[in-house]
Amino acid sequence: MSQYEGLTDEKFPDNFGYTHRSLFFLSMTISEILTISKTRRKTEELDFLNNFIFKKYNVSLMYTFTMEYCKLLESGTGNGNYAALYKLNRKVAYFKGKTYQKDFELVEKRIDKLINSDFHKYLRNLRDKTFAHTDKSEMGSSFNLPSFTDKQLKMALAHFNEMNSIHSLCAAHFQVEYIISLDDDSSDLFVERQAKYLKHYRETVKDDWDVD
């Protein structure tokens, strides 16, 4: 049986489970990156975020975002790359036939646009030369992994929204709706509360304690 009530595997592409998972991880990481990258904050919040632990956290976020992003934009041929949007698009076309042809062509063009973007080329290179493999750097060995620039962060968000939109369009042909949002503010509240505690501690104890 399918993971969705009333839909069998013969009526519903199993690809959706894989694309949904990658989009979910993508939404989590971009949400966290946006949280720790937000500059319009109180001084004590910026001070707390300057802790080295967030630099380590950023490595995990960049790794996860890059890997899941690239999975979604793989070619999707054969039995591999089941999270690829290309593969999902073709599977929906197989199930729905001529009724999906117009959307099939539209989705294909939208995916092609993402793949041909400079942002995709940047992340693909980061994955191939740094995360998935270790190529020798012109600058030599380095523990400094890149963070998104403000422009890249906006592009990451735009690409996530576009992928999510493509996924929703495909799912709509089966009367299924996926809710993958960036509305979780738990990390933002954590930063706010911990920063207040840090400020109070420093003002009360007044010692040389360093959060780093």
Image (cartoon, grey):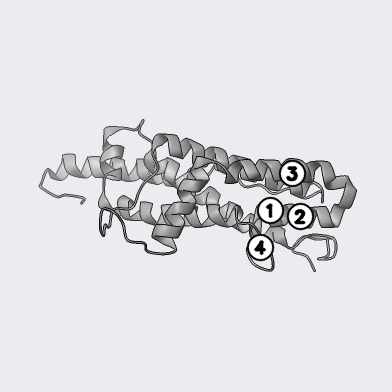
Instruction: Work out whether 33 lies above or below 150.
Output: below
Instruction: Work out whether 145 lies above or below 119.
Output: below
Q: Quadrant of residue 44?
A: top left
- C-alpha gap between disc 4 and disc 2: 12 Å
- Disc on the earlier residue, 4 or 2: 4
- C-alpha gap between disc 1 and disc 2: 6 Å
Disc 3 vs disc 4: Cβ atoms closer than 8 Å? Answer: no
Query: Which percent across, then down, holds residue 105?
Result: 77, 43
Q: Nearer the viewer, residue 55 or 187?
A: 55
- C-alpha gap between disc 2 and disc 3: 13 Å
The residue at the point 36 percent across, 44 percent down is 191
Q: Which residue is mark 3?
A: 169
Q: Quadrant of residue 198?
A: top left
Q: Amino acid at mark 1?
A: Tyr
Q: Amino acid at mark 2?
A: Arg
Query: Which percent across, then down, holds residue 117?
Result: 54, 41
Disc 2 vs disc 3: Cβ atoms closer than 8 Å? Answer: no
Camera-side mark, 1 or 3: 1
**Badge 4 element:** loop
Disc 1 vs disc 2: Cβ atoms closer than 8 Å? Answer: yes
Q: Label 3 crowding class (10 Å Cα cut-off): few <14, some 14-19, many 20+?
A: some
Q: Which residue is mark 2?
A: 90
Disc 4 vs disc 2: Cβ atoms closer than 8 Å? Answer: no
Q: Amino acid at mark 4?
A: Tyr
Q: Label 2 crowding class (10 Å Cα cut-off): few <14, some 14-19, many 20+?
A: some
Camera-side mark, 3 or 4: 4
Which numbered marker is on residue 86?
A: 1
Would residue 186 be seen by someone viewing this image from the given angle? Answer: no
The residue at the point 41 percent across, 60 percent down is 131
The residue at the point 83 percent across, 65 percent down is 8
- Disc on the earlier residue, 3 or 4: 4
